[in-house]
Image: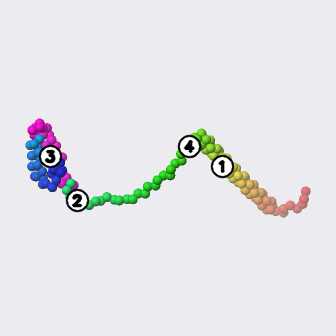
Amino acid sequence: MHLLFSGKTITEAVKIYTTKCAECSKTVPSQNMKFFTEYFFSSFFTHYKLYQYVFTVERQDNTQKVEHTVEIPPVPEQFASGTPSNIWEYENKIKEMDEAAEQRKQERELQVQTARLQTEQNLRSSMEELDQIEGGLTREV
């Protein structure tokens, strides 16, 4: 419809509409034509100036251009060269057990080192207490 009314004033558009309705009145019942005319005037002609502006005035292109880089993923290995799932699960369980054992070993080493430091500190404090005793040792037993 906008091509038919393009560049026309609203009065010219109404005249074009009435001629089109006169042509269609032979095939369309008058009650339906009345409903259609009410709808057409309440929708299209209400915003006629907006449609004229949108469809006839050339506007500045306001689109933003952004470059995107697309990284192509590496080609996956063939299924035939892959590891069967049961072997892969077994290897992962072994790896998890090795990691847990290594962690326990590091924890034990830390505990031993902490115990050594504590023992050395206790020995030093005991030696300092003995050195502080007045008179010290005077004879051997």
Q: Could you classify mark 3 by the number of other residues whose Cα lies within 10 Å: few (under 14), some (14-19), or many (20 or more)?
A: few
For label 4, the residue is 80
Residue 21 in percent (x, y) is at: 11, 43
Q: Could you classify mark 1 by the number of other residues whose Cα lies within 10 Å: few (under 14), some (14-19), or many (20 or more)?
A: few
Q: Could you classify mark 2 by the number of other residues whose Cα lies within 10 Å: few (under 14), some (14-19), or many (20 or more)?
A: few
Q: In the image, what residue occupies the spot 12% across and 40% down?
A: 33
Q: Earlier in the sequence, mark 3 or mark 4?
A: 3
The answer to whether residue 12 is seen in the rendering is yes
Tell me the tag on residue 119: none
Mark 4 lies on a secondary structure that is: helix
Mark 2 lies on a secondary structure that is: loop
For label 1, the residue is 103
Q: Is residue 131 above or below residue 12?
A: below
Mark 3 lies on a secondary structure that is: helix
Q: Amino acid at mark 2?
A: Glu
Q: Amino acid at mark 3?
A: Phe
Q: From the image, state whether disc 1 or disc 4 is nearer to you.
A: 4
Distance from Cα at disc 3 to Cα at disc 4: 70 Å
Q: From the image, state whether disc 4 or disc 2 is nearer to you.
A: 4
Q: In the image, what residue occupies the spot 88% across and 62% down?
A: 138
Residue 16 in percent (x, y) is at: 11, 49
For label 2, the residue is 58
Q: Earlier in the sequence, mark 3 or mark 1?
A: 3
Span shown in magenta = 25-54
Tell me the tag on residue 41: 3
Q: Are marks 1 and 2 in contact (CB under 8 Å)?
A: no
